[in-house]
Image: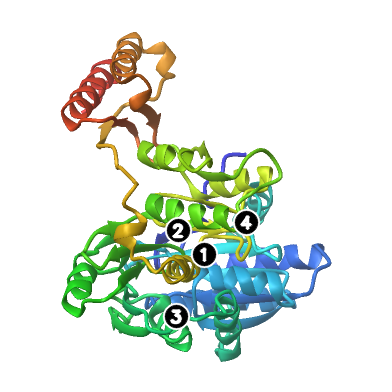
């Protein structure tokens, strides 16, 4: 069946409006509770949320639905998405629920469902739940929210797990940390200071409406200024639910997910910890990662495998081939030895570990990564047709590929959520990159009636 409720990252929308209204949130809890009972697992679920003002009532509605089915709830309160995944996997829980809309503005929210495996529920299972939710919504029964009390021990368990991955600590490291007024606001300071770092925090005062507001991983200007003003060793910024992290070097250079993959892959290979079940040491990333990353990894004998855009595709490929490291330019990096999903605070620890072990800062550690100019053009289209059926577009792509040879890349794909064709061209010089990107985009407009 076509999925209309669950997207690629759970249910998401404007809080208070369908599908993030009280009745639907309650129905999600009821349907999840029925699934838990059918699965013969422990009838207990852990729930967490980010700092949006709508989080508490959505969590209460989901919990009320679960409890109506006889499923117990433990409430972590404000925590991270990877924190809920860790607790679901290691605790006595059939599932975990995270109330978050990640990097979106505060008016939005979402419901993410995670199995006892620590991975998001499979698409097939979400489809079954979706059918049951729609049946429940046809019923006129009113939602019955339940009052929740935060179990502070849950976050403590998660932080202890993260700290245990870096027994040598962070003594002497000077960090500026931007928590996006989100999930990491209380957790990151506790973690980094416990490990001995000197930490200056910014955007760690959530008020329910300032999550991601001109701060965090989408707005690095304040972090960069803070690093330079404090003469800090490094800056790190999280997004709203802290499943991703971006960095700033001591000179103010932005270090994205591609650079993190290079820095950590090189370190893991040196330690003999990058190998997988199949083939040579491998890093998994998406088609959007820069060609410069592929070249830099190859220089160290590390293979790069690309997947479609989306961390779920990266994770699926990692599991298939047994890879331990994968991620995206956006800073969503998966260290599979320690986690089942991207985890911003874990990513920060791994980057800081390399800095401490090497005695180098991020400027030196990323110096060999030569970023190729990249141009992304979005074209609004009235319909989607296979590129093979668009002769002029095919010819424009072929011209670009012939011009660049193996020193560039051309990627044309349709958005999965919007009526857009996305054109990405990457090559050694910006002038040619922009020329070919604009030419391909214009041919798409001509053939598909884009605006």
For the point 28% across and 30% down, which residue is it?
Answer: 427
Q: Look at mark 1 in the image and give the residue it sits on.
A: 111
The residue wearing badge 4 is 273
- From this viewpoint, which residue is outermost toward the right? 40
| 266 horizontally vs 282: left or right | left
Secondary structure beneath dot 1 equals strand
In the rendered view, tell whether residue 167 sits above or below residue 434: below
Q: Which of the two residues, 137 or 313, is positioned nearer the viewer here?
A: 313
Of the numbered discs 3 and 1, the one sitting upstream in the chain is 1
Label for residue 170?
3
Q: Quote the CA–CA distance across marks 2 and 1.
A: 7 Å
Residue placed most toward the observer, 124 or 177: 177
Point out the image quarter for the N terminus: top right
- Name the spot of residue 88 as percent of width and height, x first: 66, 71
298 to 450, vertically: above or below? below
- Identified at 15% across, 28% down, the residue is 431
CA separation in Å, label 3 and label 1: 34 Å
Q: Nearer the viewer, mark 3 or mark 1?
A: 3
Which dot marks residue 12?
2
Of callouts 4 and 2, which one flags the residue occurring earlier in the amino acid sequence? Answer: 2
Task: Give me the C-alpha separation between circle 3 and circle 2.
Answer: 37 Å
Where on the picture, by quarter, is residue 136?
bottom right
Q: Residue at x 60, y 44 (%)?
A: 281
């Amino acid at each position: 069946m076509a999925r209309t409720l669950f997207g690629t990252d759970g249910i998401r929308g404007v809080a208070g409006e369908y599908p993030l209204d009280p009745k639907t949130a309650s129905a999600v809890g009821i349907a999840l509770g029925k699934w838990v009972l059918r699965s013969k697992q422990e009838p207990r679920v852990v729930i967490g949320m980010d700092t949006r003002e709508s989080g508490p009532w959505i969590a209460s509605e989901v919990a009320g639905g679960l409890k109506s089915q006889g499923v117990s709830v433990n409430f972590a309160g404000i925590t991270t998405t990877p924190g809920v995944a860790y607790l679901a996997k290691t605790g006595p829980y059939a599932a975990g629920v995270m109330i978050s809309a990640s990097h979106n503005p505060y008016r939005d929210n979402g419901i993410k469902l995670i199995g006892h495996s620590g991975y998001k529920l499979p698409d097939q299972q979400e489809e079954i739940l979706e059918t049951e939710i729609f049946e429940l919504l046809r019923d006129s029964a009113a939602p019955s929210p339940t009052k929740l009390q935060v179990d502070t021990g849950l976050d403590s368990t998660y932080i202890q797990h993260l700290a245990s991955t870096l027994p040598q600590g962070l003594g002497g490291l000077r960090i500026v940390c931007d928590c996006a007024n989100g999930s990491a606001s209380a957790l990151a300071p506790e973690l980094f200071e416990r490990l001995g770092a000197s930490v200056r925090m910014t955007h760690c005062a959530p008020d329910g409406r300032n999550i991601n507001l001109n701060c965090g991983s989408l707005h690095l200007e304040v972090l960069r200024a803070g690093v330079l003003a404090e003469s800090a060793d490094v800056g790190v910024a999280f997004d709203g639910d802290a499943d991703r992290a971006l960095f700033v070097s001591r000179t103010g250079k932005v270090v994205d997910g591609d650079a993190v993959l290079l820095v950590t892959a090189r370190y893991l290979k040196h330690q003999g910890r990058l190998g997988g079940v199949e083939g040579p040491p491998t890093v998994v990333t998406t088609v959007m990662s820069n060609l410069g990353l592929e070249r830099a990894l190859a220089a160290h004998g590390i293979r790069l495998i690309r997947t479609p855009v989306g961390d779920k595709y990266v994770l699926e490929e990692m599991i298939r081939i047994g890879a331990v490291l994968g991620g995206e330019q956006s800073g969503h990096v998966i260290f599979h030895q320690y986690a089942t999903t991207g985890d911003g605070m874990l990513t920060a620890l791994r980057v800081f570990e390399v800095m401490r072990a090497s005695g180098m800062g991020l400027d030196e550690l990323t110096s060999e990564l030569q970023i190729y100019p990249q141009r992304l053009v979005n074209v609004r289209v009235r319909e989607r047709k296979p590129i093979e059926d668009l002769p002029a577009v095919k010819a424009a792509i072929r011209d670009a590929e012939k011009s660049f040879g193996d020193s560039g890349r051309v990627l044309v794909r349709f958005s999965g959520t919007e009526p857009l064709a996305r054109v990405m061209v990457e090559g050694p010089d910006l002038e040619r990159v922009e020329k070919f990107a604009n030419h391909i985009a214009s041919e798409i407009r001509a053939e598909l009636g884009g605006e």
